[in-house]
Amino acid sequence: MKRVALVAALLALVLAGAAAGAPRHRSAPTKLTVWVGWSARELAAFKKLAAEYQKANPDVSLSVVGSINDDKIVAAIRAGTAPDVVSSFNSYNVGIYCGTGGWIDLSSLMKQSGISTSMFPPTTNYYTQYGGKKCALPLLADTYGLYYNKTLFKKAGIAGPPKTIAELTADAKKLTVRNSDGSLKQVGIDPFIGFYENVPERWILPWGGTYTDSSGKAHLATDPAWTKWLTWQKQMIDWYGYKNLVKFQAGLGDEFSASNAFEVGKVAMNLDGEWRVAFIKAEHPTLDYGTAPMPAANPSLYGSGYINGTIIGIPKNGKHTQQAWDFVKWVTTNTHALAEFSNAIKNVPSTTASTHSKELVPDTHFATFLKIFANPKSGTSPIEASGASYTNLVQNFATKWQAGQVKDLHGGLVTLDKQLDAQVSQAKGGGVP
Amino acid sequence: MLLLMAPWLVGFSVFFGYPLVMSAYLSLNHYDLLSPPRWVGLANYRYLFSVDPQTWTAVKNTLWLIVVLVPLQVLSAFGLAIMLARARQGVGIFRTIFYLPALAPPVAATLGFVFILNPATGPVNTILGHLGISGPLWFQDPHWSKPSLVLLGIWGVGNTMIIFLAAVLDVPRTLYESAQLDGAGPLQRLRYVTLPSISPVILFAVVLGVIQGLQYFTQAYVAAGVAAGQASQAADVTAVSLGYPLDSTLFYPVLLYQHGFTDFQMGYASAMAMFLLVVSFAVTLVIVLNSRRWVHEGAR
Amino acid sequence: MSAVGVAAPLVRRKPPARVRRKRMLVAIANHSVLIAAAIAFLAPFAFITLTALMTNNQALSSNLWPHPFAWHNFIDVFTKAPLWRWTLNTMEYSFAATLGVVLSSVPVAYALARIRWRGRTVAFMVVLVALMLPPQVTVVPLYVMWAKFHPFGFNFIGTLWPVIIPNWFGDAFSIFLLRQFFLTIPEEYMDAARVDGCGELRILTTVVARLAKPAIAAVALFSFLYTFNDFFLPLLYTGESAHHWVLSIGLSEFRSLHQVQWNLTMAATLLVMAPVIVLFFLAQRAFVEGVTLTGVKG
């Protein structure tokens, strides 16, 4: 008996000691997995942001995974292995994410937290919702403009960037240099669809083209801008020589490497996004270049450009919805966070408040893009139930056209319109119209 | 006995029978894996045959591949085997050299070929340039992309070549000798002795080639993706590289993959799969029935 | 006069010089074509190797010969990409699948070849049909099945299990091959064992397995090769979970990881080809025999 009591007493002592000595035991922080598309330098910037959030919110631990693309997101949602927070570089698939509920509707969460859509510029609101469901928020935006190489311009005797299509054509021809065997050595501007950032939706903006009419049906055949743009584009490509251009492109460096064709002076003018400013600063700081809006088909359109941007949302079947929302809310509306991130990767801040933030580092090259973003004529591509397949189909057509495989442009566009509508109808689950 | 067959019976029902039935069912639905399947009847089939702009391109591409690649593979395998059978010295080395590429994993081989055939900086066009020939654009040219894949396919013909070699060596010498006595020249011996004797092997190679042609995916997928990347396509616009350039490498299984696993359209992809099933059956049946005319069984 | 009874020794007359010359010309022509073909077949390997030894900038230009030989590329490849992880995954997949194929296909092939039972021909026909079917036909419902099946909360999608498990239930090609081979084993062996009172299972494991070693080795080899090179199914199931990538997927994605450093990509390509080629040299005879088995006895 005495022995038992002794042991019991000893045990109690040990336990008491352990309890007293052990640090105050908080429950382990909730682990949130965040998927983003950025990699390398830009990913590091995002991770810095995540670390800042974690410091202010120690009950949450963020695990950031980079290099994500839409395919991965789509696959993960389908298989039920999606993370807590997910983001995509563009809005093309919003129609699918919102329409199928793959990303949850954030409206009630927004109301709860006092976030309203008026905090965001109208274009960004357009591309983060579909079918009445707001399943994403913009996380920094992208706009597209013209980058031009001042050194090459001086050499060719051109004073400033082209503002009209006629000037663009003339300048491009002046800035093109051919080798003795006829192949291309330097190209003025490369309008080849599929090259770097060249996709129809970014080029058609300064031409004033739209995809759908008021009833939502595709009208590329009847909107004159498309015919004008496609005709001009093919003329340019034929002037270079289609095969010459393809061969030239095959020898160029990767778009996101330090051998980017514009950065090394192989291409004198280029349609590119505002993030290129940061890349040039990091990789070729001595490059003498300028930025301007893309030349426009008519003067009233000059200054506008294509807008899109990273979107962020919460996949369904996530386990920590409230904490995930807290992070999403912070990173998309906190002016300081947005300004800091914008400075780091040189993307356009996505709330009206942050565009006026004093923390934004002024940059003449970057200022062009802020102006394009604020221009009321700037726009984005349509959000459709068929997701990215919509614009992909148009791109498919454009690549066939530029290769000379479409003999009748108008007829081709009429067929394209029918195909686009059928695709949307099929994606909505209906039959063939 | 049942015990011996058990694993296969279970496997067959679960991994073969069930999916086949399920595929037929899904083909009549609209299914994107997020919401439950929605019945649409024959709508998917109607879309497949009359509306989808890429269907017939994909069918034509796959047919082209079968009609061009299979005979070329059989011919090259046979040709190499005949020459090896005739050679006296170094047969072992030659045999190894011809067989090695067949061992290369398809992805590795495809990557290698796309790089070598880069129209601007690749070694092939560089050497052709030194010889004064302006090389084609290979994987960047829609007229040359399929032939480039055919070259890749012929490079890997080692397996079939070994089979042909064994078969050719198996033909009894006595048959040749008696033919020679009858006054047959070498070409006639080839036509009347060698070919009939190895006809079962030819049939085997053709059937295998056709089956592989109907499933052709990996090389097309990898080649298109890499070649599109060489044209420096923007990294953020998805799924436009399948079939690059200009849908010339868009084979039927590639299109099926795109619709099913990139565009979410699983019901539609099942309809495509059903069509592929019917065609595979029909083609194999046609070949096998046709073979009765020219295959000599029991030639061993 | 010489004795007629003595048989004159057989003298092989040399064929006339004309025929000899013609034969030699044919042989030379044959050899020349063989040499030309061999060069054509080896050229890609040569180009790949040369590129693998270049620096990145040289690989992007039209230089044919590396200037400094960048041997360190082969080591750099391991630090730039998780090549070890991919190799591990590939080995896991190949070994698990090959084991499964052998263990499950042998009994089935035996049942189809040597045991008389009703429906045997039908079953064999079904095996042939399974052989002819493109995998794309069953791939969608199988994917759906694996996506919806969550025992104990385990997610199959994103792992290699959906690709490994079916191999444990028999593989049509292996069954076909083994059955053809079993057919060539004389009945007497089996009958003798049956007379001794052995059950079918016993016969299989003792008598047949030992006799069929070359066929089983061939099946194991092919299975290993096939799974080592498999791209489509792993792409489907592990495409978006990089941790489980196999070598074939890793290699195709290598280019987008680090902005297409072609020299490293080619080095990685060679490294991926290497194990298979080494395996070939070690098991040459098994290879050739196995390939022959498929075709000639097919």
Image (tube, rainbow, N blue to C red):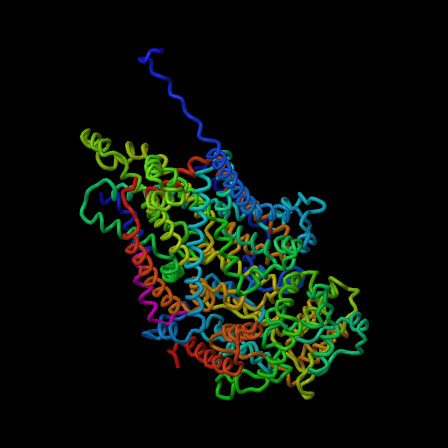
Q: Can residue A6 be seen in this view?
A: no
Look at the picture and state if A132 lies above or below A176.
below
Placement of the C terminus of chain A among the 4 image quadrants = bottom left
Q: Residue at x 61, y 46 (%)?
A: C49
Residue B252: percent from left, percent from top: 42, 64
Placement of the N terminus of chain A among the 4 image quadrants = top left
Q: Nearer the viewer, residue A150 or A309?
A: A150
Residue B261: percent from left, percent from top: 45, 64
Q: Which residue lies furthest to the front in this view?
A: C1
Apparent side of residue B268 relative to residue C278 in the rendered image (left or right): left
Residue B30 part of the magenta segment: yes
Q: In which quarter of the image is residue A43?
A: bottom right
Q: Which of C48 and C195 is in front in this view?
A: C48
Residue B76: percent from left, percent from top: 45, 49
Residue B181 part of the magenta segment: no
Look at the picture and state if B124 lies above or below A335.
above
Look at the picture and state if B159 lies above or below B56.
above
Residue A164: percent from left, percent from top: 71, 83
Q: Residue at x 46, y 69 (%)?
A: B263
Q: Is residue B16 visible?
A: yes
Q: Which of C97 and C296 is in front in this view?
A: C296
Report the magenta residues as a range: B16-32
Mark count:
0
Look at the picture and state if B105 lies above or below A426.
above
